[in-house]
């Protein structure tokens, strides 16, 4: 028995340490696994979301078109007693363009006599096709009297059949297309006169109740105008407020009160800002309802606290030594701020602002109160035109009975996500560009 | 300092004097049920006339009347859509703000359907069975004239001919006009088929109303949100459930869902049009007469809406699921629209 007591206690201590070490390693591994699984869970939910939106929506970027040979019959376009040379635009606006399409369909499928069947035949073509022909003729009145091969949009039911969203195998009275119509569609397909093509209309048209004519442009312009105002107002005001509160304001009860209020405002539900906007901008100042002007102002109110808080945090993170050094060599407080602190805080401010803007972009609740949840077919041209925004457009389409709006809803979500990714990407680029290290 | 003050006051003045004078488009508010029809007319109107496309807000009937009655002037709406008739209190409210002459135009009918997935067989219901399945309190199944908390779990317990599956009905929330109409027409219709409850109406109106209008809250009736498309999708996923929504959604999805017959009448276009289908309601819009001629295009919009090619039997609105009125009624309301005959005092 030569083992000394100290040796024994030493080995006990090592054993304890080893065991605790093993336990700590195990805890570390568990923690890492948990953290990783949290990330994986988040990533899989996002993937699921994207997958479902894209799989629902990608087909909306294509639309079924039908090829028709259309004879621009002068008899249908201008009334006999009018003098076409005198007033071409006015004559053209009242022409029977639906008649031109019907005529073309009748020559394509001769021998259809029953009125019911004729109506079914005409229903293959979108009611909007006539206006496309009108717009074409308004631009080129010299086409009257000639023939032209045109691809015109098919009706949304035809489109849904081609894309596989309407089943063929059910009883005739249970689907929205009759057996006749299916036969005509098959004939058109076999002749190569019915095809899916890129749906350009989706990007250039405003809202419509005919899915095949509905587009995102009106809502996108509305979002652009609204966010333009929000950015132009909330960024300078927010940054200026942050600079004042952070660097120049005296520390007293009033500034404390202001600070508490700003933090509280950032947590106020957005609908409250909508009510405020309704009361102040529309009812008191008499600004036009449903306009991007009011929408932008309301979203400015909503975004301001976010921007102020982010900008103050960015200013706080600039080491005070930089400001002190500037002051020490004789810079005025304003120079120290604008020449030294602000440029260093800018990346953080931009990130905060862009996150605030992205939030404002996805907002629809406050806009409900000021009338921007509305059917607006015309594309807004200026800040006081009635308009709607992308999230509202998504909401309105999601609630429409026509089945073709399902895929368009998802497509609109994709456009909105595209906007958001672009904005966040911009934030990253700006941050990289302005970032300075010390 | 004075320069700043001038700029500030100028900015203020500019915002105060914002041109509230002219509006060159029609401003329409109101019911979300009328919205899909009014928007189609508005779009057609915008395309075929030199006027701008009217703006249509979907605010619900009540919210629409509130905005509509706020006053005369371009900052207030010109037309209010409604899935019910205007109430006397709302007319009074309008009058108090100077909105005196209101023209009422009925545009057609909307049916409310109870539907299930095509994967199961069609269900035949009566109004009384709907009431028994969905009311919070029902007459005692033992036969005494008392009300008990709804004991029914399965349809079979109500009627042997019904399937033996759990009662599960998806419907709109209380903010919806569809819910109001369903409660008034279907629930109350079934409720007053009990003579002793009907007799209650004159004695204790409040109790009668709460008995007939209160839906059960134990999970058999599920509020599925305002989005009718969502209800249709849920029915496909859950074939045992029934859903309550507007006829146009059944019309658009006839390959996936089927309407239940009510009191032996199928929810078809024809049955709703001739009034034999029991759960249908009229739809309206109301026009501020004082605005006609002030805001461009109102008279023309009325003309478009009340034309045969829009609301007629083969008009484009019937293609969107609006049930047309009989011809005589159409002629009467077209006349109202043309001559702007206001509601009688």
Image (spheres, rainbow, N blue to C red):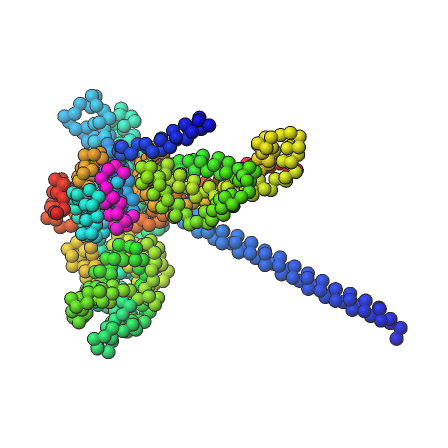
Residue B123 visible within the image: no
Q: Is residue A432 left or right of residue B312?
A: right
Q: Nearer the viewer, residue A325 or A15?
A: A325
Magenta residues (range): B59-75
Q: Residue furthest right?
A: A2
Say which quarter of the image contains residue B216.
bottom left
Residue B237 image point, x, y percent = 37, 60
Q: In the picture provided, is B312 more to the left or to the right than B113?
A: left
User: A297 or A403: which is nearer to us?
Assistant: A297
Residue B90 visible in the displayed image? yes
Q: Nearer the viewer, residue B161 or A31?
A: A31
Q: Is residue B63 magenta?
A: yes
Q: Nearer the viewer, residue A128 or A242?
A: A242
Q: Give the image location of residue B250, x and y in percent.
A: 27, 55
The residue sitting at 22% across, 67% down in the picture is B207
From the viewer's perspective, tell me whether residue A118 is left or right of residue B57.
left
């Amino acid at each position: 028995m030569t083992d000394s007591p100290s040796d024994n206690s030493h080995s006990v201590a090592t054993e304890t340490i080893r065991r605790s070490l093993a336990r700590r390693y195990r805890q570390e591994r568990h923690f890492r696994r948990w953290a990783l699984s949290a990330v994986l869970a988040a990533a899989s939910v996002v993937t699921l979301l994207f997958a479902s939106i894209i799989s629902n929506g990608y087909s909306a970027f294509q639309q079924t078109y039908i090829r028709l040979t259309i004879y621009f019959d002068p008899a249908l376009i201008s009334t006999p007693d009018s003098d076409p040379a005198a007033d071409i635009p006015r004559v053209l606006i009242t022409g029977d363009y639906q008649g031109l399409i019907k005529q073309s369909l009748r020559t394509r499928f001769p021998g259809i006599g029953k009125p019911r069947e004729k109506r079914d035949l005409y229903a293959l073509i979108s009611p909007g096709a006539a206006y496309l022909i009108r717009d074409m003729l308004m631009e080129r009145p010299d086409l009257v009297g000639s023939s032209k091969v045109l691809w015109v949009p098919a009706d949304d039911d035809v489109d849904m059949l081609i894309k596989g969203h309407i089943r063929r195998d059910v009883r005739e009275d249970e689907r929205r297309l009759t057996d006749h119509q299916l036969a005509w569609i098959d004939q058109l397909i076999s002749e190569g006169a019915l095809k899916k093509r890129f749906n350009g209309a989706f990007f250039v048209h405003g809202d419509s109740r005919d899915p095949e004519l509905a587009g995102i442009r009106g809502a996108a312009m509305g979002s652009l105008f609204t966010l333009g105002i929000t950015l132009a107002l909330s960024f300078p005001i927010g940054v200026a407020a942050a600079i004042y509160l952070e660097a120049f304001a005296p520390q007293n009860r009033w500034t404390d009160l202001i600070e508490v209020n700003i933090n509280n405002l950032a947590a106020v539900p957005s609908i409250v800002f909508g009510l405020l906007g309704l009361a102040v901008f529309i009812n008191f100042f008499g600004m036009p309802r449903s306009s991007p002007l009011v929408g932008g102002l309301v979203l400015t109110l909503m975004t301001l606290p976010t921007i102020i808080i982010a900008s103050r945090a960015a200013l706080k993170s600039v080491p005070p030594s930089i400001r002190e050094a500037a002051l020490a060599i004789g810079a005025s407080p304003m120079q120290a701020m604008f020449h030294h602190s602000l440029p260093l805080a800018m990346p953080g401010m931009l990130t905060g602002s862009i996150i605030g803007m992205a939030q404002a972009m996805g907002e629809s609740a406050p806009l409900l109160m000021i009338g921007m949840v509305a059917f607006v077919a015309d594309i807004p041209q200026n800040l006081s035109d009635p308009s709607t925004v992308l999230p509202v457009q998504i909401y309105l389409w999601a609630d429409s009975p026509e089945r073709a709006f399902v895929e368009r809803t998802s497509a609109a979500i994709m456009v909105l996500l595209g906007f958001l990714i672009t904005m966040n990407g911009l934030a990253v680029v700006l941050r990289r560009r302005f970032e300075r290290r010390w | 300092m004075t320069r700043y003050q001038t700029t500030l006051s100028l900015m203020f003045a500019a915002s105060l004097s914002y041109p509230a004078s002219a509006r060159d488009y029609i401003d329409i508010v109101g019911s979300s049920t009328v919205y899909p029809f009014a928007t189609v007319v508005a779009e057609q109107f915008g395309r075929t006339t030199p006027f701008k496309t009217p703006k249509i807000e979907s605010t619900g009937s009540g919210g629409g009347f509130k905005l509509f009655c706020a006053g005369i002037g371009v900052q207030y709406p010109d037309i209010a859509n409604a899935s019910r008739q205007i109430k006397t209190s709302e007319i009074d409210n309008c009058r108090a703000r100077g909105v005196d002459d209101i023209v009422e135009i009925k545009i057609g009918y909307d049916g409310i359907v109870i539907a299930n997935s095509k994967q199961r067989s069609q269900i035949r219901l009566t109004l009384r069975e709907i009431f028994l399945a969905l009311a919070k309190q029902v007459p005692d199944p033992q036969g005494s004239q008392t009300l008990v908390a709804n004991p029914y779990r399965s349809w079979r317990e109500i009627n042997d001919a019904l399937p033996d599956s759990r009662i599960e009905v998806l419907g709109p929330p209380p903010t919806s006009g569809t819910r109001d109409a369903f409660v008034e027409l279907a629930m109350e219709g079934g409720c007053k088929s009990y003579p002793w409850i009907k007799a209650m109406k004159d004695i204790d109106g409040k109790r009668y109303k709460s008995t007939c209008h209160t839906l059960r809250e134990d999970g058999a009736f599920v509020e599925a949100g305002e989005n009718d498309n969502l209800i249709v999708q849920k029915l496909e996923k859950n074939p045992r459930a029934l859903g309550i929504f507007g006829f146009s959604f059944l019309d658009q999805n006839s390959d996936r869902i089927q309407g239940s017959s009510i009191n032996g009448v199928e929810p078809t276009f024809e049955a709703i049009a001739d009034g034999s289908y029991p759960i249908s309601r009229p739809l309206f819009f109301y026009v501020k007469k004082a605005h006609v001629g002030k805001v461009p295009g109102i008279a023309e919009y009325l003309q478009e809406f009340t034309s045969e090619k829009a609301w007629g039997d083969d008009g484009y609105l019937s293609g969107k699921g609006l049930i047309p009125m009989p011809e005589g009624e159409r002629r009467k309301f077209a006349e109202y629209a043309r001559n702007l005959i206001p509601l009688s005092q």
